[in-house]
Amino acid sequence: MEKSDIAPDTFLIGIAASPGVAIGETFLVNRTRMIPVERPISADEAPSQVEAFLEAVRLSKAQLEEVKASVADRSLAEHLYIIDTHLLILDDEMLIRETISRIEQEQVNAEGALKRVLARFRQVFDSIDDEYLRERRSDIDFVGDRLLRNLMGKGQQSLSEIDQKAIVVAHDLSPADTMQMDREKIIGFITDVGGPTSHTAILSRSLAIPAVVGLETASTYIPGGIPAIIDGSHGMVILNPSPETFREYLEKKQFLEYQEKELLCYRDLPAVTLDDCRISLRGNVEVSEEIPYVIEQGAEGVGLFRTEFLYMNRLVPPDEAEQFEIFREIVTRMAPHPVTIRTLDVGGDKFVPEINLADEANPAMGLRGIRFSLKEVRLLKEQLRAILRASAFGKVRIMFPLISGISEIRACKEYFEEIKAELSSEGVAFDPTTKMGIMIETPSAALLADRLAREVDFFSVGTNDLIQYLLAVDRGNEHVAYLYEPLHPAVLRALRTICSAAEENGIEVGMCGEMAGDPLYALVLLGLGFRELSMNAPGIPRVKRILRQVRRADADDLLEQLMLCDTAQEASSWLEEEMARRFPDLFGAPAI
Ligand code: PEP
Ligand code: MG
């Protein structure tokens, strides 16, 4: 669509993903999700498909050579042999010959032929009875994925091309995409897909960038370079705003900025209720650049450091030394407050092509979180060493993601003890009292909370996944986002079960899912018994302001009322009214 086809004041409604108002010009990023599609071809089409495949091989080699040439960092240079291995695979006669022959003989397009060949290679590697060789399978996955991307992704616009302040419009953005952008340049996000706890939404909240997701086909008709407004609090986008609308939103933006500054007066005050119940409000962190912001908002430590972001947009995973340096820096800067470092949680929607399997039919239920780490034990052990070594510099807590049963946590504990013994025998400093906890984010972990509580020092509830799995609602799917309900009676019951199990066993229970940072739920979570809430830093002042104005008993009463509601809709309308009555300036009608 041309710029002139968009009528003045064209309003679009999507899903509110990150609050605030952004006013600027659109920048269109053409990034449709790349899923290899097999299709039959005619014999005439075969030569062009063979040529496309060979071109993808040439391009992949050139990219890898370029990366090799650009690695100046000596600590990374040691790992360049991995790139050489990948270059050798790209030269592999069998890979090339078999793909070409499948295109020609089986009359299937290049993507399809390559997909079949890669599947066969993987099978061969899986059946090898030698752990080292079996691990080489990940090299095949890596190379295969690069080839597929090059085969399918021609003409993609690079996100690093954005060179002036812009509102990014895209079909979808993976966490890796978002990380690639120059964050100074992005003032807002608009995407076709995604739900309120998709990673684009979480990252934009962390970075305080207004975002609206789930706009279905918006990226197909919003042109680049047109004026637009994002009202991230109400899930609204306005294209070609009229002068009146522009003025209205400019005032709203200024009001929100003023309100945010006002709330900062709570920064150095503790989150304590009127009757002295103390809650720790901590920050969720994806990249270490967020730390100054986390401190500025008054966080008492980091309740969730998502280490998977360290693995994105690079060919070689970070080794122990690199991770240790990053953890040490964060721990030192946050001292005397604790930092909870979560081991790698890749897979699902946090797909990292360099290490994840490319072809899982159902990635949310696939080899993600702790399942991946228990398979790639070398990576897990490296992380455990790096985390424990950082514990010599401040208070560290270690946390394992996506635990679904007792045997997983026992396996983690064994590795944890093994690494402690290893460090002790090497004379390397670490804090032997480092606490070890788990995310409760699967229904099985919630149901088993009483047993799991005997195994660990603390729980942190990951509502983003817990709600997804409990209600069978994909957290990133805009079509079912209306069913993603934190106040669903089943969610409230699960949270109560988890908190009671923690209390009965005398272990700490916190929450680090997005529910923790939404001020609407602050009283509910207080009533349930959460004493640590970890959230994207911008959410801290509002939640603190609420907690400082209530009594523990008010929260208990409110929770009892809420638990009586039959449906999530009933519960949320009741809670919204109740919170607006108690805190009209925070939850009342919008200022404008
Ligand atoms: C969660 O699931 O609530 C969580 C905090 O983990 P992530 O969003 O990284 O999956
Ligand atoms: Mg999770």
Image (cartoon, grey):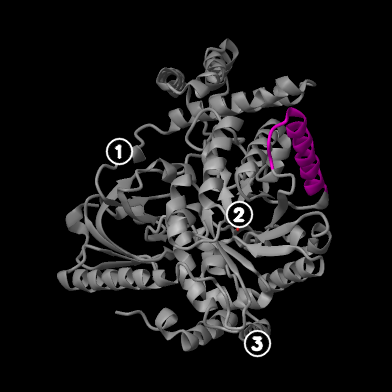
Of residues 112 and 315, the one nearer the viewer is 315
Does 98 lie within the magenta span? Answer: no
Q: Is residue 361 above or below residue 490?
A: above
CA distance separating discs 3 and 2 = 32 Å
In terms of sequence position, does the residue under pointer 2 or pointer 1 come before the other?
Answer: 1
Question: Relative to 574, is 184 on the left or the right?
Answer: left
User: Mark on residue 58?
Assistant: none
Q: Is residue 435 above or below residue 48?
A: below
Q: Residue at x 75, y 53 (%)?
A: 404
User: Mark on residue 161?
Assistant: 1
Disc 1 element? helix
Q: Which residue is mark 2?
A: 338
Q: Residue 247: x and y, percent? A: 19, 71
In front: mark 3 or mark 2? 2
In terms of sequence position, does the residue under pointer 1 or pointer 3 come before the other?
Answer: 1
Q: Is residue 415 above or below residue 303?
A: above
Q: Residue 199: x and y, percent? A: 50, 52
**Kind of residue at badge 3:** Asp
Q: Main secondary structure of the magenta part?
A: helix
Q: Is mark 3 within 8 Å of ligand 1?
A: no
Q: Residue 86: x and y, percent? A: 55, 19
Q: Quadrant of residue 88?
A: top right
Q: Quadrant of ligand 1?
A: bottom right
